[in-house]
Image (cartoon, grey):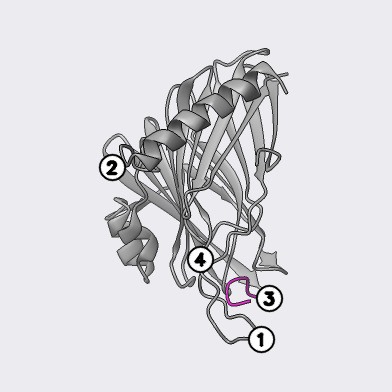
């Protein structure tokens, strides 16, 4: 389950630049199946949090308007090379996703 | 595989046990709870209000980067930086989406008031970023022309 997240974190001056990509369908619940005519149920990541060395730095709530295979980029001041960034996420069906990266 | 993974799996197992015992809500590990009212709101104003960004005033100190024209409404890059002191959170809205609130971000412990992501846009409309800072709400808007909508499919 945990090949679903790709992360990269690099220092830019005294700020860590973190880029994250999560593999997820992000189904809106508004589309119809072309064959059956039935609505495809919503399936999307709704909560995401990021930590620097275990301390929360970013908390996010997402709706169905976040693109499929969500990408996000954030910056943390006061981080240094070798520090650890961790991201965890959960979708509306209760599936958990997590990833970790060491800042280079 | 490695120590980290083993620790994680162990943790996940313990979590699963708690979950199955009904002792823990699945989202209890996250400080925030999902704001259903705000994400279900159907108009920009209702969504702003429900997400806690009501009465936001326009501010030139929020920099919003969006493309003028998006060929594919399913993936529209959006980037925002708030230069307003004491910015605590930021939210992205797409005015004419069935549910305008796209995402809400809270910054802490050194996170810069910056976020870039990709959003879906149903049609040509305003992208708004709203900011909470120092107990007040601010916003800025930019229109994006969408050639092919990204919501209906």
Main secondary-structure element of the magenta-colored stretch: loop
C-alpha span from label 4 to label 2: 33 Å
**Residue at point 50% right, 26% down?**
B11
Residue B136 — which label? 2
> Dot 4, crowdedness within 10 Å: few (<14), some or many (≥20)?
some
Say above or below: B51 vs A53.
below
Residue bearing mark 1: A35
C-alpha span from label 2 to label 3: 36 Å
Residue A85 — which label? none
- Residues tagged 1 and 3 counted as in contact (Cβ below 8 A): no
- The answer to whether marks 4 and 2 sit on the same chain is no
- The answer to whether marks 1 and 2 sit on the same chain is no
**One can see residue B84 in this view:** no
**Residue at point 63% right, 50% down?**
A70
Badge 3 marks a residue whose secondary structure is loop
The disc, 1 or 4, on the residue closer to the chain's N-terminal end is 1
> Dot 2, crowdedness within 10 Å: few (<14), some or many (≥20)?
some
C-alpha span from label 1 to label 2: 49 Å
Residue bearing mark 3: B148
Please report, as a chain letter, where disc 3 is located.
B
- The answer to whether marks 4 and 3 sit on the same chain is no
- Residues tagged 1 and 2 counted as in contact (Cβ below 8 A): no
C-alpha span from label 1 to label 3: 22 Å
Please state which of the two labelled residues, at mark 1 or mark 4, is closer to the viewer: 1
Quick one: B30 or B91, which is closer to the camera? B30
Residue bearing mark 4: A42
Identify the magenta region.
B149-153
What is the quadrant of the N terminus of chain A in the image?
A: top right
């Amino acid at each position: 389950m945990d090949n679903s997240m790709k992360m990269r974190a690099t220092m830019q001056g005294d700020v860590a630049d973190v880029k994250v990509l999560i593999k997820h369908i992000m189904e809106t619940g508004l589309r119809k199946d072309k064959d059956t005519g039935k609505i495809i149920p919503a399936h999307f990541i709704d909560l995401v949090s990021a930590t620097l060395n275990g301390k929360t730095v970013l908390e996010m709530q997402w709706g169905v308007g976040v693109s499929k295979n969500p990408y996000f980029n954030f910056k943390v001041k006061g981080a240094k090379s070798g520090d650890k960034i961790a991201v965890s996420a959960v979708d509306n069906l209760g599936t958990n996703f997590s990833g970790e990266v060491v800042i280079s | 595989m490695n120590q980290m993974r083993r620790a994680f799996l162990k943790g996940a197992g313990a979590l699963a046990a708690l979950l199955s015992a009904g002792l823990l809500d699945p989202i209890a590990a996250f400080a925030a709870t999902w704001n259903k009212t705000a994400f279900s709101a159907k108009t920009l104003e209702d969504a702003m209000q429900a997400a806690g960004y009501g009465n936001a005033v326009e501010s030139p100190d929020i920099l919003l980067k969006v493309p003028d024209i998006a060929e594919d409404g399913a993936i529209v890059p959006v980037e925002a930086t708030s230069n307003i002191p004491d910015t605590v959170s930021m939210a992205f809205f797409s005015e004419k989406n069935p549910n305008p609130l796209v995402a809400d971000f809270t910054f802490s412990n050194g996170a810069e008031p910056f976020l870039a992501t990709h959003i879906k846009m149903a049609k040509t409309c305003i992208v708004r970023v709203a900011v909470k800072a120092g107990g007040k709400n601010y916003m800025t808007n930019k229109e994006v022309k969408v050639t092919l909508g990204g919501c209906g499919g």
